[in-house]
């Protein structure tokens, strides 16, 4: 009961805005105006409340941890107030802005520390331009750490014993604690540990990126492709080392006798397996200096052309393209396997369609009975451009309306309830298989009635 009442205002406001949009007017209603607009439309309210109850999004968002199973409040008011804050979208947006500002500050920090080289390379702690000596950077870091720590304390106060088991909370602690350590040691030492602690804070950006659906898809694809990338790198390195052994055996005796103008390294490019591996990686993977070394060698010793061509084909067109194909396949597979996000998108689209259909039902319900008759549906098809467009989207003509009505009227009452109408058509697409199956079953039943 509390859940239904708490979500009614927002739902009705969305409906009112949709009705104003269809009427061609700009929506600028508040909660009181919404209640006035919807006054007297009990059937529409009932249908919308039913849609809301069946909606996966509302079910997930309406969970209130401060209530027990019987609906009694078991948390103190202070904990409830803080819980509403940390669970709100406004709070997440605020923290996202803070994270972005933190990343910008880290850019200034990194540039300030880099300015100490090479003049103060031996003793960076005396560099006057280092980030720990810049007052405004230090103040901003302390302010950001206070914000992060406050967030951690708020979430810990709300979640209590389950706080440490949340992965995002673990990430927050993993970045907040090193942040205070960085501030504590920044004025004393400048070691590799200090730089590592600063880089750790970049992990917080993952929380911001994961909240954007498009970036989330890219990040999940990248995460699933890390394993193929790792094994592909091993394969690529193995092939390069194999060819490096061969070129040292066959190409080095010829290459070492050549004189390369403006390239001191070229004559010893195949001197050892290690240098040959670096040369092949530079030429085939990084696509650099191929013409500077290989072309002069091929001109002096034409027999090397075949070997260089085979190396180019196996590494550049073979191994690298194979790795790319596997990475792309894994990323696409991760996107397809993200069933939860796909279900959420499908549910949001279905709910939006059902809300629009509920408003259509209310507009076509001339007698205000809360259900549609065949005559009202035909009248809506003739006079309501939105209903006609919806039927056209599903490739349904006026001649099919009687069949559609009988399919929707599953109980044979001669009327289609708002909720029944919305549930049947809310997720239908053009020539939807479910709708086509229903039409086929109805046609078979009709044919059996004629035969009998």
Image (spheres, rainbow, N blue to C red):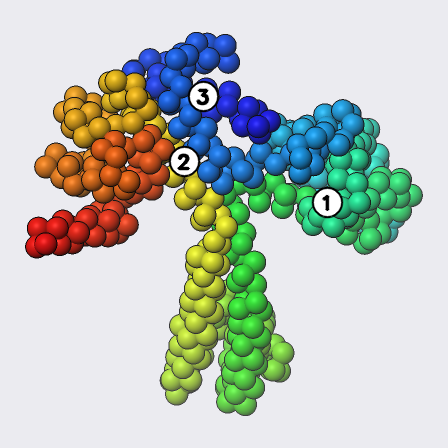
Left or right: 45 in relation to 150: left
Name the quadrant containing residue 268. bottom right
| Mark 2 crowdedness (10 Å alpha carbons): few <14, some 14-19, many ≥20 | many
Q: Residue at x 50, y 10 (%)?
A: 32
> How many circles with numbers are drawn on the protein?
3
Q: Earlier in the sequence, mark 3 or mark 2?
A: 3
Q: CA distance from mark 1 to mark 3?
A: 35 Å
Task: Give the structural element (helix, strand or loop) at label 2.
Answer: helix
| Viewer-side residue, 229 vs 292 | 229
Kindly identify which residue carries mark 2.
351
Q: Residue at x 40, y 28 (%)?
A: 47
Kindly identify which residue carries mark 3.
12
Give the percent coordinates (x, y) of residue 217.
49, 50
Q: Earlier in the sequence, mark 1 or mark 3?
A: 3
Q: Quadrant of the C terminus?
A: bottom left
**Relative to residue 429, is residue 301 depicted above or below?**
below
Q: Quadrant of the N terminus?
A: top right
Q: Earlier in the sequence, mark 1 or mark 2?
A: 1
Q: Residue at x 25, y 18 (%)?
A: 367
| Front of the two marks 1 and 2 | 2
Mark 1–mark 3 contact, CB under 8 Å?
no
Mark 1–mark 2 contact, CB under 8 Å?
no
Residue furthest left in the image: 451
Kindly identify which residue carries mark 1.
169
Give the percent coordinates (x, y) of residue 31.
50, 13
Q: Is residue 169 visible?
A: yes
**Relative to residue 127, is residue 333 depicted above or below?**
below
Give the percent coordinates (x, y) of residue 195.
78, 49
Q: CA distance from mark 3 to mark 2?
A: 14 Å
């Amino acid at each position: 009961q509390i859940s239904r009442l708490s979500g009614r205002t927002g739902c009705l406001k969305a409906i009112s805005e949709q009705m104003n949009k269809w009427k061609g007017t700009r929506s600028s209603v508040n909660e009181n105006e919404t209640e006035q607009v919807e006054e007297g439309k009990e059937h529409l309210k009932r249908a919308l409340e039913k849609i809301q109850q069946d909606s996966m999004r509302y079910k997930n968002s309406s969970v209130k941890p401060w209530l027990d199973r019987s609906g009694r409040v078991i948390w103190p008011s202070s904990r409830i107030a803080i819980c509403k804050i940390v669970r709100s979208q406004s709070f997440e947006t605020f923290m996202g802005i803070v994270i972005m500002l933190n990343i910008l500050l880290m850019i200034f920090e990194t540039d300030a520390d880099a300015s100490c080289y090479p003049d103060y390379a031996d003793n960076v702690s005396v560099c006057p331009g280092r980030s720990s000596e810049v007052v405004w950077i230090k103040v901003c870091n302390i302010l950001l750490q206070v914000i992060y720590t406050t967030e951690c304390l708020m979430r810990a106060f709300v979640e209590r014993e389950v706080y440490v088991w949340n992965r995002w909370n673990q990430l927050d602690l993993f970045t907040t604690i090193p942040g205070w350590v960085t501030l504590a040691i920044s004025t004393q030492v400048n070691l590799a540990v200090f730089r590592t602690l600063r880089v750790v804070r970049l992990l917080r950006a993952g929380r911001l990126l994961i909240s954007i659906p498009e970036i989330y898809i890219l990040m999940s694809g990248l995460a699933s492709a890390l394993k193929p990338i790792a094994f592909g790198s091993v394969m690529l390195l193995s092939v390069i080392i194999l060819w490096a052994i061969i070129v040292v055996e066959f190409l080095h005796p010829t290459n070492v006798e050549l004189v390369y103008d403006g390239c001191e390294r070229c004559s010893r490019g195949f001197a050892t397996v290690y240098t040959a591996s670096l040369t092949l990686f530079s030429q085939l993977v990084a696509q650099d200096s191929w013409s500077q070394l290989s072309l002069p060698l091929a001109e002096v010793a034409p027999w090397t052309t075949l070997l260089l061509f085979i190396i180019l084909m196996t590494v550049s067109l073979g191994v690298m393209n194979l790795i790319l194909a596997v990475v792309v396949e894994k990323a696409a597979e991760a996107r397809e396997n993200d069933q939860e996000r796909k279900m959420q998108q499908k549910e949001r689209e279905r709910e939006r369609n059902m809300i629009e259909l509920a408003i259509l039902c209310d507009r076509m319900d001339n007698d205000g009975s809360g259900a549609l008759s065949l005559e009202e549906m035909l009248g809506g098809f003739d006079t309501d451009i939105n209903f006609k467009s919806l039927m056209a989207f599903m490739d349904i003509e006026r001649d099919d309306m009687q069949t559609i009505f009988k399919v929707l009227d599953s109980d044979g009452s001669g009327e289609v309830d708002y909720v029944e109408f919305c549930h049947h058509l809310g997720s239908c697409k053009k020539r939807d298989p479910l709708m086509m199956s229903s039409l086929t079953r109805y046609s078979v039943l009709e044919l059996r009635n004629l035969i009998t």
